[in-house]
Image (cartoon, rainbow, N blue to C red):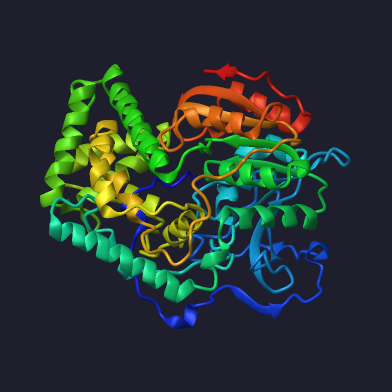
């Protein structure tokens, strides 16, 4: 899944029963059990759980290949590897090529943090058919996510109520409500999931990856990380450089930035994507239904959001489209050029008092299904981010920074800036200002940056390649739109990625695909 924007959508008012305190944690003691020697029991996959996002069991692949699921034991606390264990959910599709051509397992992480890989991989599986000729395609729910000892914070009704709140406070009352809900959310997470909150850092997930590599029987980790998955992959390479096999990072997180710098970069990234969307709409042969010029398109969007701040419109009964939900929906549509037509339709309808499409787009970003159930995406997202990130930003600090964020984006700046208060009074200390991804001795890692990426701006790819180290990070540029490059189906990008993963052909550093 795409990297979740650092929006105020990550802080929720919540109160769950204390009985879920250790939900998902194993009570057994692994004792002297060698977890690297465990054998996985692969079976037909069940339908995704609510925490994974719900829906139907995955359908067979076009060639008849079946999806199989299993659980893998891992230490709950990697500082105590012989202590209690948790179960991590895995999914795979076996390699389809001729006997003897299989390289090993190719493990995917689709981002978030907080996205269920068990649900996501079948959605994209057909697009990885060529890679499957030589790899078992594998993904997983990282710890704290989906079926892997999920963090729990709020029920569906509480989330619906929260997402109606104002994420960009204009006065003291709105600011108080925003901060109170953040405090309530953080307290609820501690109350309901305190057994997992100290153990969901990216370094923990990276150690899980190395255990997974061994349990799957691979000498090296072959890996495809997307969005936050690139940060996870970089941390893995830092911890286990000699265990890296063939790895690709797509939609690359900038590992050199602290949370404030990352939030500011995202504001600029989403603004760039909005500029590109507006220009694309007015440049077509047919008339753009939402504006006469690119500036007119953006001005009308700004007016819509200003009006929604005081007067929400009809959405999906009984919920209404608020300023916060509309901004969230617009952000979701900017993740992929394929969504631009829905954004156009949604804006056109909203101008006529119908907010359904924008609200449904917002629901998608927040992990809300059509039946009103939420995945644990938001709870996992904030829990992992707050465990990883050391800085804690006060409301007063955010207010001082608002002019800088507004300058980066009139539309998204304040929305993203206020998300920086999410980790205030979080019960677990953050690990670092930014991740360490230096990986001397690692095999080459192909780092793919997209010039039009809103969520992980293009500059992050070069900084990731440099931070990995000389001879490790190999940068490839895609001049395109949307979040990520490989799934754009650009032939140049796919040929380069496939050539490396399948045949170990490293493209020349600085290669550009258009």
**In the figure, is residue 258 to the left or right of 310?**
right
Q: Residue at x 36, y 60 (%)?
A: 424
**Between 63 and 236, the one nearer to me in the picture:** 236
Whether 211 is drawn above or below 503: the answer is below
Could you say where residue 506 lies in the image, as x and y percent from the top left? 72, 24
Residue at far right of view: 100
Q: Residue 273 lies in what quarter of the image?
A: top left
Q: Residue sitting at 36 percent across and 56 percent down?
A: 422
Q: Position of residue 347 (x, y in %)?
A: 23, 38
Residue in view at x 55 percent, y 47 percent: 123
Q: Nearer the viewer, residue 111 or 254?
A: 254
In percent of width and height, residue 437 lies at 62, 41
Residue 234 left/right relative to 340 = right
Q: Is residue 134 left or right of residue 282?
A: right
Give the image location of residue 255, x and y in percent.
Answer: 53, 39
Vertically, is 111 above or below 345? below
- The answer to whether one can see residue 379 in this image is yes
In-front residue for pair 446/62? 446
Instruction: Give the quadrant of residue 338.
Output: top left
Residue 358 in sight:
no
């Amino acid at each position: 899944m795409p990297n979740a924007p650092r929006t105020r959508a990550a802080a929720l008012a919540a109160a769950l029963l204390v009985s879920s305190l250790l939900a998902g944690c194993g009570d057994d003691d692994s004792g002297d059990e060698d977890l690297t020697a465990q054998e996985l029991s692969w079976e037909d996959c069940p339908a995704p759980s609510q925490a994974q996002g719900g829906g139907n069991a995955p359908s067979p692949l076009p060639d008849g290949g079946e999806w199989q699921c299993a659980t893998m034991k891992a230490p709950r606390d990697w500082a105590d590897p012989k202590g209690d264990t948790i179960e991590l959910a895995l999914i795979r599709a076996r390699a389809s090529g001729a006997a003897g051509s299989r390289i090993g397992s190719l493990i995917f992480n689709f981002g978030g943090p907080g996205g269920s890989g068990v649900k996501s991989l079948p959605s994209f599986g057909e697009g990885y058919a060529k890679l499957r000729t030589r790899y078992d395609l594998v993904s997983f729910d990282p710890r704290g996510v989906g079926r892997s000892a999920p963090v729990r914070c709020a029920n569906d009704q509480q989330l619906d109520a929260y997402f109606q709140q104002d994420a960009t406070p204009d006065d003291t009352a709105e600011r108080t409500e925003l901060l109170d809900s953040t405090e309530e959310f953080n307290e609820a997470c501690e109350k309901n999931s305190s057994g997992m909150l100290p153990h969901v850092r990216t370094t923990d997930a990276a150690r899980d990856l190395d255990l997974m590599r061994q349990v799957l029987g691979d000498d090296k980790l072959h890996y495809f990380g997307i969005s936050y998955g690139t940060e996870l992959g970089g941390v893995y390479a830092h911890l286990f450089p000699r265990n890296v096999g063939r790895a690709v990072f797509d939609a690359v997180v900038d590992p050199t930035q602290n949370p404030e710098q990352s939030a500011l970069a995202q504001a600029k990234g989403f603004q760039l994507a909005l500029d590109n969307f507006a220009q694309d709409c007015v440049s077509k042969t047919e008339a753009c239904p939402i504006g006469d010029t690119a500036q007119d398109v953006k001005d009308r969007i700004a007016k819509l959001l200003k009006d929604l701040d005081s007067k929400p419109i009809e959405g999906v009964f009984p919920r209404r489209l608020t300023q916060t939900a509309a901004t969230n929906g617009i952000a979701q549509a900017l993740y992929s050029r394929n969504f631009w037509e829905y954004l156009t339709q949604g804006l056109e309808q909203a101008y006529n008092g119908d907010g359904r499409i924008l609200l449904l787009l917002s629901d998608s970003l927040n992990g809300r299904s059509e039946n009103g159930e939420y995945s644990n995406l938001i709870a996992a997202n904030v829990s992992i981010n707050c465990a990883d990130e050391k800085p804690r930003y006060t409301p007063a600090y955010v207010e001082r920074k608002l002019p800088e964020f507004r300058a980066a984006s009139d539309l998204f700046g304040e929305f993203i800036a206020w998300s920086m208060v999410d980790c205030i009074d979080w019960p677990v200390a953050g690990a670092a200002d930014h991740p360490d991804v230096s990986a001397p001795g690692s095999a080459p890692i192909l780092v793919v940056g997209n010039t039009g990426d809103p969520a992980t701006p293009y500059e992050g790819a070069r900084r990731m390649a440099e931070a990995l180290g000389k001879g490790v990070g190999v940068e490839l540029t895609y001049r395109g739109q949307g979040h990520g490059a490989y799934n754009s189906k650009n032939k140049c990008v796919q040929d380069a990625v496939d050539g490396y993963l399948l045949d170990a052909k490293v493209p020349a550093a600085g290669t550009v695909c258009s």
